[in-house]
Amino acid sequence: MDSQKEALQRIITTLASKNDEIQNFIDTLNHTLKGVQANSSSILLELDEEFDGLYSILDEMKESMTNSIKQEQARKSQELQSQLSQCNNALENSEELLEFASRSLDIKEPEEFSKDDFLQKTFRVTMASAFRLSLKPKVSDNMTHLMVDFSQERQMLQTLKFLPVPKAPEIDPVECLVADNCVTVAWRMPEEDNKIDHFILEYRKTNFDGLPRVKDERCWELIDYIKGTEYTLSGLKFDSKYMNFRVRACNKAVAGEYSDPITLETKALNFNLDSSSSHLNLKVEDNCVEWDPTGGKSQENKVKGKENKGSVHVTALKNNKRSGTPSPKRTSVGSRPSSIRGSRDRFTGESYTVLGDTAIESGQHYWEVRAQKDCKSYSVGLAYKTLGKFDQLGKTNTSWCIHVNNWLQSTFAAKHNNKAKALDVTVPERIGVFCDFDGGQLSFYDAASRQLLYSFKTKFTQPVLPGFMVWCGRLSLSTGLQVPSAVKTLQKHENGMSGSTSSLNNVMQ
């Protein structure tokens, strides 16, 4: 019976997973169909715009050439009209001179035809404008120099076709690398294409493995104008389990299809501070905790207010009993939602502590802490969920930490089980915390230089929580970080040696 139920449960789980894949594929098909329709309309509009642009250019060229022909026509007409006018004037003058000369020839009397008079008449005829005219047109009627041959352009337009689209690149998962909160994506073209100008890389964070989902919470982010065939995204916060990637190639005119997307795992520890059980003198906001000396007082005022309300309620009950009026139903007061640590009171007394809201039960994890420069005292470490509300980090056998004290005298020490080991190193601006739960190791590093500050070696018997103490100052956390490669290398080196670190832990036991 039980085995049959287990088999049925496996089948149900597999079917549910398959249904989820099919639904995602349906969403992808619908999204693609909408994309085809939208992109087709967009391409048609662009095509109309391109042809309208060609028509506009042709109209401009036609107007320009027409103006040139008209200007040439006007110039030649003006030249010919001027020459024609000169010829008409010369012809009219010549006719007058001919008539004058003919009358002179008709003179019979010698005294009327004197020598001087003859010379004057001869001079007038000789100076006729007809003798100075060029009887050749200044311009010809030939306009062939303004003829246009569109045969080459027509042939070019007839060969007009759609642009060659680059093929989709292929992302090589083997060459892709996820390390140190950086992701290097590498790809190649299926065949050589010397027309490619650049690539476009798109990525997005997701919590789903496998193919990208259309209905995902996050949008694709774009990196344009990548000249090479790989790109490294750096300085990322891995606050999701995976990242989707896809690439497309572009030439000078058009972008090609996207590559087949790939999903890379970007696993890292993400946690916030558990404000529900932090000390009342600590102000917790997201991944920051700050000492607030007025926090307890405001809470005391709230408690007094509740007590006053309680006394009024008791008086009302007494009056109700006297009058015979039934009392209302009582509701529980002061209950709060249970956190990862379970239902418990806040830290109190001198335990100015706040824990993370996510338990570590396996694996290797890393986070960083930065303290305010004038912070007087703070601790960074780990603790079991059973840490008491009066307990301080490092003073119990269920907590481990390094403690910085800048009050009265400066000290820097590793603490566990109420024992301390002074650390002869400079307190860094940022402290990196490395937890290897399965290997039973807690190490602290200078986050900038990766210098090892101290290591605890133990066997964790319960889930642990990141722990922080702060007094007169402020701490800020950086989570979503992978274990840095340098830390992994140092851990391998340290685990291979039995030196000072082991002896320090022996002192702490």
Image (tube, rainbow, N blue to C red):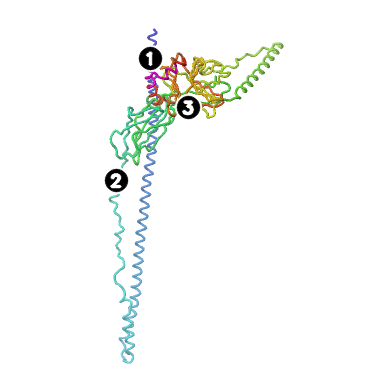
- Alpha carbons under labels 2 and 3: distance apart: 77 Å
Q: Is residue 117 visible?
A: yes
Q: Is residue 496 magenta?
A: yes
Q: Where, by quadrant of the figure, is residue 241 drawn?
A: top left
Q: Which residues are magenta?
A: 493-505
Look at the picture and state if 197 lies above or below 402.
below
Q: Residues within 10 Å of mark 2 (few under 14, many from 20)?
A: few
Residue type for callout 1: Arg
Residue under pointer 3: 426
Helix, strand or loop: magenta stretch: helix
Check the picture and name the quadrant holding the N terminus: top left
Q: Is residue 56 above or below residue 163?
A: below
Residue closer to the observer: 219 or 140: 219
Q: Could you classify mark 3 by the number of other residues whose Cα lies within 10 Å: few (under 14), some (14-19), or many (20 or more)?
A: few
Mark 1 — residue? 10
- Front-most of 167 and 421? 421
How far separated are the C-alphas under marks 1 and 3? 56 Å
Q: Nearer the viewer, mark 2 or mark 3?
A: 3
For label 3, the SS is loop
Q: CA distance from mark 2 to mark 1?
A: 63 Å
Q: Residues within 10 Å of mark 1 (few under 14, many from 20)?
A: few
Residue 276 in sight in this render: no
**What SS does tag 2 mark?**
helix
Whether tag 2 and tag 3 are in contact, CB under 8 A, the answer is: no
Which residue position is annotated with label 2? 158
Tell us which disc is closer to us: 2 or 1.
Answer: 1
Q: Earlier in the sequence, mark 2 or mark 3?
A: 2
